[in-house]
Image (spheres, grey):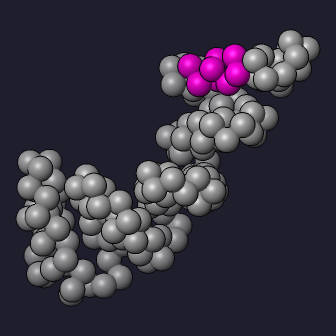
């Protein structure tokens, strides 16, 4: 499959929900170019859409192996880990994504939510605080920050909640 438009065709199939055709195209590209990071990533997205989360994770791992500096591939791997309930791995992948692109807001937002769900409120505060500093009108960042501060008020004293708010 030396067609340079092959992945575009796979994306069109994905958008039409023709997952088996999209999978077939990605597999053909990877047969010829086993180190094609974009094909691995797209294959992971297709598998994820089809509910094949373990396969998706493996494809995202291959994408990050082929293109380790691509933040989006690390972010997608984080989503797969999170979907599989592997929260430590998910957090690590989101951090890897942010190390490569500090303004990948979706990764910062997901990491903040993941840390909040694990009860790591101060670390979550750092994530959401940075997100809101980078993107002051982020509705999801402000919403999640508000939820976090509410949670902190439930778990800790009002004095500590004020202390958390002052860090912003």
Q: Position of residue 26 (x, y in %)?
A: 19, 71
The single residue placed furthest to the right in the displayed view is 159
**Magenta region, residue range:** 143-151
Residue 31: name its quadrant.
bottom left
Q: In the image, residue 12 lies at what x, y percent?
A: 11, 53
Within the magenta stretch, is there residue 148? yes
> Residue at coordinates 32% horizontally, 77% vertically from top-left?
36
Total numbered labels placed on residues in the image: 0
- Residue at the (12%, 72%) spot, across then down: 24
Query: Do we see residue 72 in this rendering?
Result: no
130 sits to left or right of 10: right
Q: Quadrant of residue 4?
A: bottom left
Q: Is residue 146 left or right of residue 143?
A: right
Give the x, y percent position of residue 64.
47, 70
**Quarter placement of the C terminus:** top right
Q: Where 15 falls versus 84 (above or below)?
A: above
Residue 8 seen in this snapshot: yes
136 left or right of 26 in image: right
The residue depicted at 33 percent of the width and 68 percent of the height is 55
Q: Does 146 appear above or below 60?
A: above
Residue 59 % position (x, y): 36, 70
Which residue is rendered at x = 88% and y = 17% of the image?
157
Q: In which quadrant of the rendered image does the N terminus lie?
A: bottom left
| Membership of 112 in magenta stretch | no
Q: Is residue 42 above or below residue 145?
A: below
Q: Nearer the viewer, residue 133 or 115?
A: 115
- For the residue pair 120 and 141, the one nearer the viewer reads as 120
Left or right: 32 in relation to 140: left
Please, what is the dominant secondary structure of the magenta stretch?
helix
């Amino acid at each position: 499959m030396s067609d340079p438009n092959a992945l575009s065709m796979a994306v069109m199939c994905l958008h039409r929900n023709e997952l088996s055709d999209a999978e077939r195209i990605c597999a053909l590209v990877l047969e010829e170019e086993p180190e094609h990071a974009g094909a691995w990533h797209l294959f992971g997205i297709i598998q994820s859409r089809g509910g094949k989360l373990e396969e998706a994770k493996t494809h995202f791992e291959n994408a990050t192996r082929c293109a380790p500096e691509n933040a989006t591939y690390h972010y997608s791997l984080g989503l797969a880990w999170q979907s599989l309930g592997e929260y430590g791995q998910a957090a690590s992948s989101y951090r890897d994504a942010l190390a490569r692109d500090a303004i990948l807001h979706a990764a910062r937002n997901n990491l903040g939510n993941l840390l909040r769900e694990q009860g790591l409120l101060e670390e979550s505060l750092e994530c959401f605080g940075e997100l809101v500093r980078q993107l002051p009108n982020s509705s999801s960042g402000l919403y999640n920050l508000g939820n976090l501060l509410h949670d902190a008020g439930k778990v800790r004293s009002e004095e500590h909640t004020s202390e958390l708010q002052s860090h912003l």
